[in-house]
Image: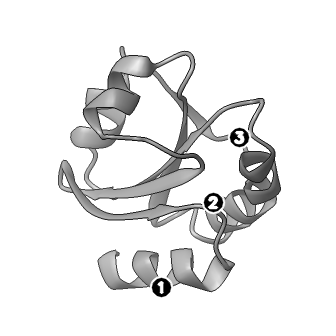
Amino acid sequence: MEHLVLTDDNFKTEVLEAKELVVVDFWAIWCYPCRMLMPVIDEIAKEYEEKIKVGKVDIDACPKISSEYGIQSIPTIIFFKGGKMVESLSAVRPKEEYVNVIKMNI
């Protein structure tokens, strides 16, 4: 499953105006922990594809969004619902932690 590539141009429409829960992965290609987390995010996207939206923000390509949400370390996963941030998890964590946040918000 392909992730939605989020940019300065589509972030408002795809994330802030979305009806469903949106899981946003703030990452960079050079970030080894980000690459370690990719398979977990892929699994979550596949398992919940009918219920949530999963997108990725390349912090190097989108410094405006990254700055707006105070991203200081990556990977950072932010969960949005109804245009508002409901949870933020930084660093690589067990899949269950992400799933628990999803289950509480879908």
Answer with the quarter of the image where residue 91 lies: bottom right
* Above or below, 95 relative to 35: below
Q: Residues within 10 Å of mark 3 (few under 14, many from 20)?
A: few
Residue topped by disc 3: 2
Expressed as whole percent of the image width and height from the top left, the position of residue 3 reads 64, 41
* Above or below, 71 relative to 103: above
Expressed as whole percent of the image width and height from the top left, the position of residue 97 reads 54, 81
Going from N to C along the chain, the mark reached first, 3 or 1, is 3
Mark 1 vs mark 2: in front: 1
Expressed as whole percent of the image width and height from the top left, the position of residue 48 reads 57, 69
Tell me which residue sits at (40%, 31%) in the image.
66
Mark 3 vs mark 1: in front: 1
Going from N to C along the chain, the mark reached first, 1 or 2, is 2
Q: Secondary structure at mark 2?
A: helix
Indicate the amino acid at tag 3. Answer: Glu
Mark 3 and mark 1: span between their CA atoms? 22 Å
Residue topped by disc 1: 100
Query: Residue 45: which disc?
Result: 2
Circles 1 and 2, Cβ within 8 Å, touching? The answer is no
Mark 2 and mark 3: span between their CA atoms? 9 Å
Q: Secondary structure at mark 3?
A: loop
Answer with the quarter of the image where residue 72 lies: top left
Circles 2 and 3, Cβ within 8 Å, touching? The answer is no
* Above or below, 23 relative to 89: above
Indicate the amino acid at tag 1. Answer: Asn
Tell me which residue sits at (64%, 73%) in the image.
93
Image quarter (top left, top right, bottom left or bottom right) of the C terminus: bottom left
Q: Would you say 91 lies left or right of 89 here?
A: right
Mark 1 and mark 2: span between their CA atoms? 14 Å
Q: What is the residue that sits farthest to the front in this orientation?
A: 72
Please name whichever residue, 69 or 5, is drawn nearer the observer in this view of the structure.
69
Q: Secondary structure at mark 1?
A: helix
